Amino acid sequence: MYGRLVQRCKNSTDCDFLYDSELCYECIDTHKSFKCLYSERLQECVDVLFSFDMRNCQNCILCTNGRNLNYCIENKQYNKIEFEKKKTEILSSQKNIEEAKENYIKIRDRALVKYASATKCNNTTGDYMYNCHDGVMVFDASDTKNCSYVADVDKIIDCYDCNNTYTGAERCYNVMGNLSSNNNMCTIYPMYCNDVQYSDSCYHCQSCFGCVGINKKNYYILNKEYSKEQYQKIKEEIVEQLKSDGLYGDFFPPELSLFGYNETLAHEYFPLSKEEALKRGFRWQEKTTGTYGKETIKEKDMPKTIGEVSEDILNEILVCKDCKKNFRITKSELDFYKRMNLPLPHKDFECRHQDRMKKRNPRKLWHRSCMCDLKTHQHGAEKCENEFKTSYSPDRTEKVYCEQCYQQEVS
Ligand SMILES: [Zn+2]
Ligand SMILES: [Zn+2]
Ligand SMILES: [Zn+2]
């Protein structure tokens, strides 16, 4: 429930970029983990809470850069009894959880980080990458070859400027929401399509131009069928016109968008003020959806522990602590919080989601050098001189290391 890019997971709530995991809550960028809470960048962890960059760890609270740890708090060893006592105490009330969240931010800001989250990558800049080869500005990507300026992509080759493009797409440019499609350009949601340009929501189509919502069609222009020869002639004329207007190759212009800039994912990754957005030709949505002021329980009167909560809560209207929007708890959420012994959230889904996304690095890169000056490393008495592109901006507090220095310290 309430996640983004949650894949092959069970019984997890409020997680983003969670893979092959179960019973997780408020976890981000986490793989193959079980019963983990309020953590980031976990791999193969069990019962890990408020922790950052952990691999193969169990029973840890407020730890960073942990490898193969068990019963640790703030990276110090405890015995099982001491650990369980501390864990029960932290999870006993909303107040203690909020305190732990604050402590987590402090330890996380001092953690050691690798310049990019990149595994099995070669000659590629970006972040959150797995098995990516030869590309620049590659984010949240796996299995890419010769792809640049792409994000949220998997198994693609020779694509530029594509988002949400998956399973074997090749030679696509300026495409959004692309599945198993080749040779497409400036198009939204082409699924199993080849040679489609300036179209929207086409399925199983070949050679189409300026079409919307068609299925299994060939040689279509503006949703009308032509012979192959006619299609090629008219398409060439349109392309020549677009070229002479200096528009060919550009994506659809912003005024055609059905949404306000502030309602879209773009705003999440590249926030603009209303003035900036309007200046660039985007719309702006003044009225956000939702109801306000209808709450039947004030935020300060919310039950402090899940033990105090009965099914009556399902009939109540709650209010978000931040944006004051009303929200409800559904039965399946309540069951999850009861099962996990977690207090009810004090924020609506959108604010919870925004809080998590703020913890992830931006889709921007800075040129920096390794911050390591450990004398035990190969660079000896000198500071490490390795340089890289990183999504950690220079004003951040983490120690940003190159691959070699990070591996030597953390693995
Ligand atoms: Zn809110
Ligand atoms: Zn280094
Ligand atoms: Zn070093």
Image (cartoon, helix red, strand yellow):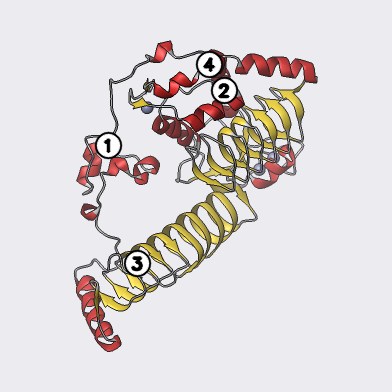
Q: Which residue is mark 4?
A: 94
Q: Is residue 374 visible?
A: no
Instruction: Give the CA distance from mark 4 to mark 2.
Output: 8 Å
Task: Give the quadrant of ligand 3.
Answer: top right
Q: Secondary structure at mark 4?
A: helix
User: Dot 3, crowdedness within 10 Å: few (<14), some or many (≥20)?
Assistant: many
In the image, what residue occupies the spot 26% across and 69% down? 210
Instruction: Give the CA distance from mark 2 to mark 3.
Output: 44 Å
Instruction: Give the CA distance from mark 4 to mark 1.
Output: 34 Å
Circles 3 and 4: CB distance less than 8 Å? no
Between 232 and 81, the residue placed more toward the observer is 81
- Give the percent coordinates (x, y) of residue 353: 44, 34
Q: Amino acid at mark 1?
A: Ser
Q: Which residue is mark 3?
A: 202
Q: Which residue is mark 1?
A: 273
User: Dot 1, crowdedness within 10 Å: few (<14), some or many (≥20)?
Assistant: few
Mark earlier in primary sequence (1, 2) = 1
- Give the percent coordinates (x, y) of residue 342: 57, 22
Residue 370: image quadrant is: top right
Mark earlier in primary sequence (2, 3) = 3
Q: Amino acid at mark 3?
A: Cys
- Give the percent coordinates (x, y) of residue 173: 39, 65
Instruction: Give the CA distance from mark 3 to mark 4.
Output: 48 Å
Circles 2 and 3: CB distance less than 8 Å? no
User: Dot 2, crowdedness within 10 Å: few (<14), some or many (≥20)?
Assistant: many
Q: Which residue is mark 2?
A: 342
In the image, what residue occupies the spot 47% across and 23% down? 345
Mark whose residue sits in front, 1 or 2: 2
Circles 1 and 3: CB distance less than 8 Å? no
